[in-house]
Image (tube, helix red, strand yellow):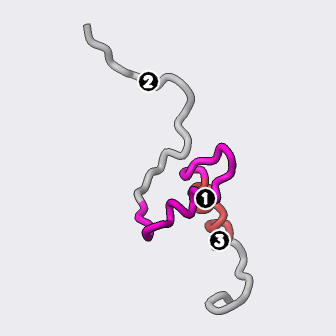
């Protein structure tokens, strides 16, 4: 008897894009030191990237290299 999966069961996948990042030594330990209760390293990274994207995509705020 064989089983084939024609469709996915369960909830839809979120945050499906993946990447591998390399960090300087000690970075992950620093991140773990500042995690909120119940927060994972992945949660921290997703939030950090989202905040940085909003900052960079938003209007320039002045300073060197920012018109």
Question: What is the magenta range?
Answer: 21-43
Q: Name the residue under label 2.
A: 7
Residue 26 vertical position relative to residue 14 in the rendered view, above or below: below
Examine the image and state in which quarter residue 66 appears: bottom right
> Cβ–Cβ below 8 Å for labels 3 and 2?
no
Q: Does the magenta stretch include residue 18?
A: no
Q: Seen from this angle, which residue lies furthest left?
A: 1
Going from N to C along the chain, the mark reached first, 1 or 2, is 2
Alpha carbon separation for disc pair 3 and 1? 29 Å
Graded by Cα atoms within 10 Å as few (under 14), some (14 to 19) or many (20 or more), the crowding at tag 2 reads few
Alpha carbon separation for disc pair 3 and 2? 37 Å
Q: Seen from this angle, which residue lies furthest bottom?
A: 64
Going from N to C along the chain, the mark reached first, 3 or 1, is 1
Q: Name the residue under label 3.
A: 57
Q: Where is residue 23 in the image (x, y as percent from the top left)?
A: 44, 67
Q: Regarding mark 2 in the picture, which secondary structure is present there? A: loop
């Amino acid at each position: 008897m064989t089983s084939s999966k024609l469709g996915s069961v369960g909830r839809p996948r979120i945050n499906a894009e993946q990447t591998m990042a390399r960090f300087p030594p000690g970075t992950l330990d620093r991140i773990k030191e500042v995690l909120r209760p119940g927060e994972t390293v992945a949660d921290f990274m997703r939030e950090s990237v989202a905040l940085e994207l909003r900052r960079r995509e938003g209007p320039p705020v002045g300073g060197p290299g920012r018109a």
